[in-house]
Image: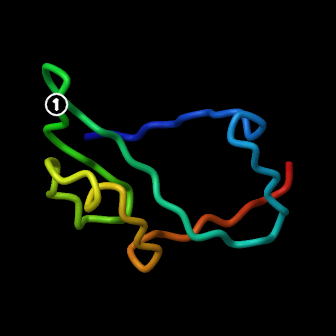
Amino acid sequence: AGNFEISIPLAALHWQPKPGKIYRADLGVLRGANGQTTQRIYWTNKATAITADVPSEAELTPALWGKWKVVGE
């Protein structure tokens, strides 16, 4: 548990967000051992217990995402 800050250059994501706009998004981390995913942890999507079914893991569910508001510098 704790607070974390991450930084990813937007150019690496090929994303040019517009200030003031709200985007639906989620952020997650996959944990594993010996090449196998053992846990999926996401910021807002809590329906992530499945770790052994690729189609279910790859499914996009925007209704479970949070909202990101882009602010100017």
Number of numbered labels in the structure image: 1
Quadrant of the image containing the N terminus: top left
Q: Is residue 56 left or right of residue 42?
A: left
> Label 1's element?
strand
Residue at horizontal 74 percent and vertical 40 percent from the top? 10
Q: Is residue 6 left or right of residue 39?
A: right
* Residue 34 on image: x %, y %: 13, 19
Rendered position, 26 above or below 63: above
Residue at horizontal 47 percent and vertical 74 percent from the top? 62
Residue placed under numbered mark 1 in the picture: 36
Residue at horizontal 14 percent and vertical 24 percent from the top? 33
Q: In terms of image quadrants, where is residue 63?
A: bottom left
Q: Is residue 57 left or right of residue 11?
A: left
Front residue of 28 and 35: 35
The amino acid sitting under disc 1 is Gln
Q: Is residue 42 left or right of residue 6?
A: left
* Residue 22 on image: x %, y %: 69, 72
Q: Residues within 10 Å of mark 1 (few under 14, many from 20)?
A: few
Residue occupying the far top of the picture: 34
Q: In terms of image quadrants, where is residue 21?
A: bottom right
Residue at horizontal 78 percent and vertical 59 percent from the top? 71
Rendered position, 26 above or below 2: below
* Residue 20 on image: x %, y %: 81, 70
* Residue 18 on image: x %, y %: 84, 62
